[in-house]
Image (cartoon, grey):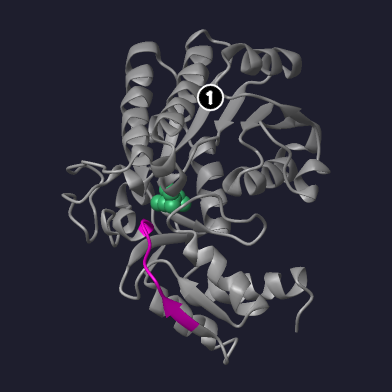
Amino acid sequence: SILIIGACGQIGTELTLKLREINGINNVIASDIREGSKELMQSGPFEFINAMDYHSILAIIEKYSINEVYLMAAMLSATGEKFPAKAWELNMNSLFNVLNIAKEGKIQKVFWPSSIAVFGPTTPKENTPQETIMEPSTVYGISKQTGERWCEYYFNKYGVDVRSIRYPGIISWKTNPGGGTTDYAVEIYHNALLLGKYNSFLNKETKLPMMYMDDAIEATIQIMDAKPENIKVRSSYNLAAMSFTPEEIAQEIKKIVPEFKISYHSDFRQKIADSWPKSIDDSRAREDWGWKHQFNLKKMSESMLHSLKIKYDVL
Ligand code: VAH
């Protein structure tokens, strides 16, 4: 059976719900340090866990005979800059715990998310290649870059079957944003419906690689279902779907919410965003395990606003 650590997070929540649909509710154990959304908590078995505590993880693995772990717990880029030591501890210790449990043969497969945050100011900004210079300037990015090195090391040295994706900014409506720099692209949809306006903390030209949650979940399940011999990158795969600026997302929203107004007031997150690429070359993922995105900005905006109108019961 499957264990999701960090099941209450933005990706963890929807990954848990989808894996339960596919594998059956009782074969997917959700775990986190805190409770999650009502939908998640009512969707099947839940265990409190401290991802930094090896024995807390092992106890759950033995209790439910877990053989696959999705380690989705982490502190993201913006929060990580406020609490650097905590971000490093959580992001690294949780990974070492899961890699070591796999090395001891107690689980057979691991998914661990990396991020475009592994790239830094010296990385080529357009069509960033799979292999390129990476000098991340955030603690979050440093922890993800180091984590990639350890995943590849545990695969090569101990045969641990760990698979990883460098997620771009992920946009979804089921959970509230969790301390990311790309979260402006989540907040903007909620505010468009609730307030008719949004003050963006990134400036209008800030172009970033982004992906709708449905595509991110699809890719995660696809890479985990792929035959081991097709996973030729054991650090982490570049993955992309679209790139856009706050101005472009606002234009798209105005087609559905005509009176919507956007304003701009950059904060500390502007520097983080400026250190990241504008677009990503994910051809290796497409070649090796058949990745293909479905959502572009138009389709995502329609889906987000449709779902949020129902959630907020607004016309
Ligand atoms: C963040 N959403 O903003 C995450 C992600 C590439 C962005 O890593 O920190």
| Amino acid tagged 1 | Lys
On the image, the x and y values in percent for residue 47 come to: 75, 27
Does residue 261 appear left or right of residue 68 in this picture?
A: left
Density class for disc 1 (Cα within 10 Å; few <14, some 14-19, many ≥20) is many
Residue behind mark 1:
109
Residue at 47% x, 60% y is: 211
Quarter occupied by the C terminus = bottom right
Residue 213 or residue 226, whichever sits in front: 213
Residue 198 point in image, percent of width and height = 52, 76
Task: Indicate the position of residue 98 as horizontal and vertical percent values.
Answer: 52, 20
Image quadrant assignment for residue 242: bottom left
Q: Is residue 118 above or below residue 228?
A: below
Question: Which sits in the foreground, 298 or 91?
Answer: 91
Q: Which residues are magenta?
A: 262-269
Name the residue located 74 percent from the left edge and 38 percent from the top edge: 35
Quick one: SS at disc 1?
strand
